[in-house]
Image (cartoon, helix red, strand yellow):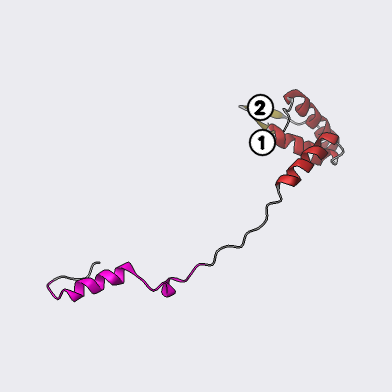
Amino acid sequence: MSKLDKDQVIEQFTQAYTAANGKAPEIVAKGGWYSVDGGKNVRLATLVDMTAELSGGNSAATKTEKSTTATKKAPAKKAAPKKKPASTAGFSVKAYWEEQVIAKQNASRPPR
């Protein structure tokens, strides 16, 4: 991914937001995060996506961004391994030690 120019992205977002909502957004920047009109804090790349949504996706830069993210989102689904129920496992440590203690036939009790 290429480096995004902060001022250019904010300017494009402001223009798209103003065209869509009729008023300029209030953008607060703090530590690399941007809050638009007091909403959820987002990164600069998310502002680029929001600009594309507001402007209808006409930007050439957003088309290349979408094509690169589309190629990354194509992992094949793997089938989850089937788990055996506990009752068919056949061996229980608790049951094993209970049998061992009872088999000694002394004053011992099975574990709690």
- Which residue in the rendered view is the most extreme toward the right? 58
Secondary element type, mark 2: strand
Secondary element type, mark 1: strand
Q: Is residue 84 magenta?
A: yes
Q: Is residue 44 left or right of residue 98?
A: right
Q: Which residue is mark 1?
A: 42
Q: Tell me which residue sits at (43%, 75%) in the image.
A: 88
* Residue 13 picture location, percent across and down: 78, 32
Image position of 67 with respect to 25: above or below: below
Q: Nearer the viewer, residue 66 or 32?
A: 66
The quadrant in which residue 109 appears is: bottom left
The N terminus lies in quadrant: top right
Q: Nearer the viewer, residue 78 or 27?
A: 78
CA neighbours of label 1 inside 10 A, class few (<14), some (14 to 19), many (20+): some
* N-terminal-most mark, 1 or 2: 2
The C terminus lies in quadrant: bottom left
Q: Which residue is mark 2?
A: 29
